[in-house]
Every structure is written in C-alpha cells, then in structure tokens.
Image (cartoon, grey):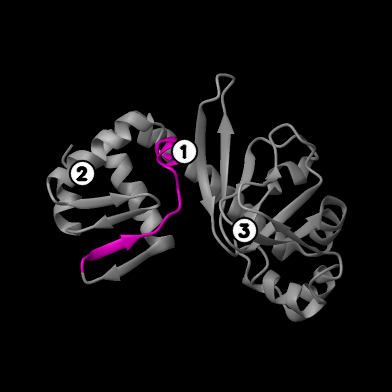
Amino acid sequence: MHNLIRDDVTTFLRRSSLFRNLDEAHLDALALKAQSAEFRAGQFLMRTGEQGDAMFIVTSGHVKVATTSDHGAELLINIVEPGGVVGEFALLDGGMRSADVVALEDVKAVKLPRSAFLSFLETHPRACIHLLKILTDKLRLTTRLAEDVAFLSLATRLYRHILVLAKLHGKETDKGLLIKHKMPQKELASAITASRESVNKQLQSWSSLGLVETRTGSILIKNKRALAREAENH
C-alpha cells in the first residue's frame, strides 16, 4: 500500500457501495491487501480486452465506462462517481475487460488485486450478496439503456441524461440549475446513442425556446418544468 495509510483505505472502502456494510475488522483485513492508485484526466484505468486482474473503487473524481465500435463510434455506458466500483465483472472469472474505463478528471482510487478479492469473498458471504446487488443494478442499467434507445425520442433521452448529470454536478443559481459536467458534446451524444450533430441541434432548439443555455462544459436549465414538458412530449 502506497501514498495512503491503512486507515485512509479503510475509510474509502467503508464509503464504497460494495463494502460499506462490513464491520470494522473485515474492512481492516481487506485494507491490508489494497493499494492506492491515481490517474490523470483522460488516462485509462482499464481497456477493453485486457486481462481482469484488479478492480477499482473510485474515491475522488469521476470515470466513464464506455465501449467503442470497430469504426470508432463510442457508446457511453455509465459515469461512475466516488464510492462506485469498476472492473468487478472480469475480476470474478479472470476474463477480458468488456469496456474501457477512463478518468474524466484527475481520479484517486483504491485498487484490489483479483487474488486478494477472491480470497476475501470466500470468507465473507455478506460481501458476495452486496456484489450480486451491484451486478444486478448494472444489468438493469444495460437493459434500460437498450430500452431507451428503442422506445424514447432523442429529446427525451437527452433530457433524462441531463438529469443524471444534474445529480452529479448540478447547482441551483439565481438564473437556474447550472450543470458543470465537463463532458464534451461528443461524449454527451455517446451517452444517449446519438450523433453529436443531433444533440447540438436539440440543445439549440431548447435554447431558442429560452429553456436552456449551453456553454463549453456546462448547461444552464432556465425553466425545469417547461423543459420537462417539452422533452417528455416528444
């Protein structure tokens, strides 16, 4: 373990969705096997096709989970915030990574090697139950993504994704809800399986109606109720 003392790692483990309900003794035992890791914005935590030899618990910053087609088109699967877990799928069977995980900003994380993680699961059945819940939630997310693409309009998908960003980065101001998401429009489009041009066109349409104001790295929602009606009625 480097950069962080064991008490710090124990604190980070306690905040994670997977380990937060474990008792102090179990957390301390796991912390002894953990390592700290830091990534710069744009750096890969893991790449598609790599061997799954470790999982990460994000302790600060945000990472994106995405896949890329043979033609270079990107599909954003999820944005993981502090406390979230990435890399656990391949960790269980030792298989290849199924997606890229990239730091959206400078990120700190706790790294758990596969051998240590599997050894821990063998002796801590409660952690297995929490892991199953996390895996189930991610499967539901994948199903919802497929349903959204099949059944919802672009306007509705974009609006709902903006709401997700608002939960992570939103702040009420005297002009409205300001969302400093630091996400290029290309990635915003990828998140809803759309083209950058169509997302830009939709944002411009809402802007012309006085519903939103867009700038590089931010969206200002001026009228939340009117935007909801406009987006959900498409």
Q: Look at discs 2 and 1 and give the one toward the viewer.
A: 2
- Count the marks: 3
Q: Which residues are magenta?
A: 175-191
Question: Which numbered disc flags the more N-terminal residue, 2 or 1?
Answer: 1
Between 35 and 24, the one nearer to me in the picture: 35
Between 164 and 39, the one nearer to me in the picture: 39
Between 94 and 8, the one nearer to me in the picture: 8
**Residue drawn where x is 71% and y is 63% of the image:** 127
Q: In which image quadrant can residue 58 be found?
A: bottom right
Q: What's the CA distance linking mark 3 and mark 2?
A: 33 Å
Could you tell me residue 2's position as x and y percent? 84, 68
Q: In which image quadrant can residue 173 be found?
A: bottom left
Q: Secondary structure at mark 3?
A: loop
**Residue drawn where x is 31% and y is 62% of the image:** 178
Left or right position of 215 against 81: left
Residue type, mark 1 in image: Thr
Q: What's the CA distance linking mark 1 and mark 3?
A: 30 Å
Question: Which numbered disc flags the more N-terminal residue, 3 or 2?
Answer: 3
- List the residue tagged with mark 3: 106
Left or right position of 138 against 5: left
- Numbered circle sitting on residue 231: 2
* Contact check, label 1 and label 3, Cβ < 8 Å: no
Residue found at the far top of this picture: 71
Left or right position of 17 against 232: right
| Residue 100 falls inside the magenta stretch | no
In the rendered view, would you say 88 is above or below 189?
below
In the rendered view, would you say 94 is above or below 24?
above
Residue type, mark 3 in image: Asp
Residue found at the far front of this picture: 216
Q: Secondary structure at mark 1?
A: helix
